[in-house]
Image (spheres, helix red, strand yellow):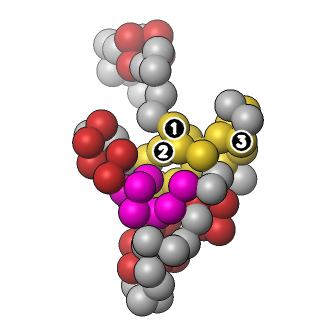
Amino acid sequence: MKTGISVHDAMTTKPVVAHTQDTIKYCAKKMRDSDVGSIIIVDKNIPVGIISEKDIVERVVAKGLDPNKIKARAIMVK
């Protein structure tokens, strides 16, 4: 599929990241504030996973879990 946009033009030089011990509430706020649909999860500045809006909905909200208590490492996709 050709879009006329190169990968380089679509990439960001500063991806939005959170740490494995950050809460889901923190991750969601950071995603909202950065206007992104997913966030890279890091441990010691090394990417170890990702969380998307869908992950938060399916793995936290729909299950009635508390986003103030659930940590990113618990729902991130590796």
Horizontally, residue 20 falls left or right of residue 26, namely right
Tell me the tag on residue 17: 1
Task: Look at label 1 and name its amino acid.
Answer: Val
Specify whether residue 45 is in view. yes
Mark 3 secondary-structure assignment: strand
Mark 2 secondary-structure assignment: strand
Q: Of the two numbered discs 3 and 1 on the same chain, state the one appearing first in sequence.
A: 1
**Are discs 1 and 2 less than 8 Å apart at CB?**
yes
Residue 14 among magenta residues: no
**Magenta-colored span:** 22-28
Task: Look at label 3 and name its amino acid.
Answer: Asp
Overall secondary structure of the magenta section:
helix
- Residue, disc 3: 43
Classify 7 as above or below 25. above
11 or 64, nearer to the observer: 64
**Badge 2 density bin: few <14, some 14–19, many ≥20, Cα 10 Å:** many
Residue 23, position as x, y percentages in the image: 50, 62
Q: Quadrant of the N terminus?
A: top left
Residue 38, position as x, y percentages in the image: 44, 47
Task: Look at label 2 and name its amino acid.
Answer: Ile
